[in-house]
Image (cartoon, rainbow, N blue to C red):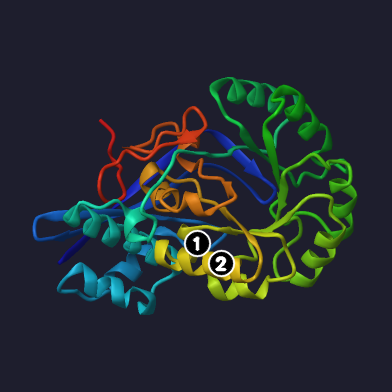
Amino acid sequence: MRLDWEIVPLRLREPFRISRSTMSARDTVRVALHHDGVTGYGEIVTSVHLGLDVPRVTAALDGLGTWPDPETLLAELPGLPCPPGVLAGLDAAVLDLIGGRDGLPVHRLAGSPSWQPVPTAYTIGICGTERAAETARRLHARGFTVLKIKAGSPDPDDGVARVAAVRAAAPGARLLLDPNGAWSAERAVGLLERMPYLDAVEQPIPPGRPDLLAWIGARSPIPVIADEDAGGAAEVERLAGAVQGVNIKPARCGGVLAALGAIAAARRGGMDVMLGCLVSSSLGIAPAAHLAGQARWVDLDGHLLLARDPWTGLGGEDGVLRLSGRPGLGVRPAT
């Protein structure tokens, strides 16, 4: 079996601002596994926040050995000396290869015999109130029924007016709020009490204090979802009793198989699941999309934020993800 890779830059439609940064582009590394005439693809997403850049990715790939077949790689994957983001790309590629070889979509390899189209959130970055409302109005007209609003600005009423404007512009849409850990616990409770109509809030405070997340959750009028505090199964287990939900991202926790372990841990802990993503192409979003039936909240819009998606096969432009039905990940290069 042969592995190769290529650096693929992605550019966003417009700058995307969250509480800790503004992004206009990011690099990804597309990996390809070849075996017996079949090729499987995966995407490794770089992230400043996760400490994963192109040199670290390529160094990890350079340090890998070889495998006689995809099943051997799949079995050895959890123990490879690679960052979780690199494991996620390899996990996607080997599942894509096995699915393509056997004529099976990844969701079946992951234990779900069927898959139904699912609404995805679309994320509105930090911006002015009028612009947020206009964006929400346009998205709602296209069919989006779930909208996520980023918060975390210095404004003492951070997000309240903007969320109200989005609510008025997209009546009936489910609204999620994500400060990316920018608030204190006291500020979070005070602001959330003014927005009781939200469907949930993600990671209102910096990671590392599940006790404070529990304090907020006991006082919040809406469910609290851990994001930056949630990684793989071990991190999720430690959040049991502290939050109502966890955001599981295959690109962060190590791929589909690691995400299944985290989902199982969430269920054991009585927590609902959000499936999230990083900004990436349809190739990078596809692994999480195959798990969408196991989540209460689906936030898989990373490919929709791009100026040009180099892959196709997931849909989502009208607010609904639809798998192509092809084997493996079900995506293919865009023409």
Q: Residue pushed farthest front? A: 113
Residue 231, label in figure: 2
Q: Is residue 99 above or below residue 191?
A: below
The vertical placement of 65 against 26, above or below, is below
Q: Is residue 12 visible to the viewer in this orientation of the structure? A: no
Kind of residue indicated by mark 2: Gly
For image coordinates 61% across by 24% down, the residue present is 140
Q: Are marks 2 and 1 in contact (CB under 8 Å)?
A: yes
Residue at 16 percent across and 59 percent down: it is 34
At mark 1, the secondary structure is helix
Q: Nearer the viewer, residue 325 or 51?
A: 325
Frontmost residue, 265 versus 83: 265
Binning the other alpha carbons within 10 Å of mark 1 as few (below 14), some (14 to 19) or many (20 upward) gives many
- From the viewer's perspective, is residue 254 above or below residue 139? below
Q: Estimate the x, y position of residue 76 in percent, counting from the top left.
A: 30, 77
As helix, strand or loop, the secondary structure at mark 2 comes to loop
**Could you tell me residue 245's position as x and y percent?**
66, 59
Picture coordinates of residue 316, whole percent (x, y): 46, 34
Residue 79, quarter of the rendered image: bottom left
User: Mark on residue 252?
Assistant: 1
Disc 1 residue type (three-letter): Arg
In percent of width and height, residue 125 lies at 65, 38
Query: Residue at horizontal 70%, vertical 65%?
Result: 207
Q: Nearer the viewer, residue 255 or 106?
A: 106
Mark 2, other Cα within 10 Å: few <14 / some 14–19 / many ≥20: many
Q: In which image quadrant can residue 164 be found?
A: top right
Relative placement, left or right, of 156 versus 201 is: right
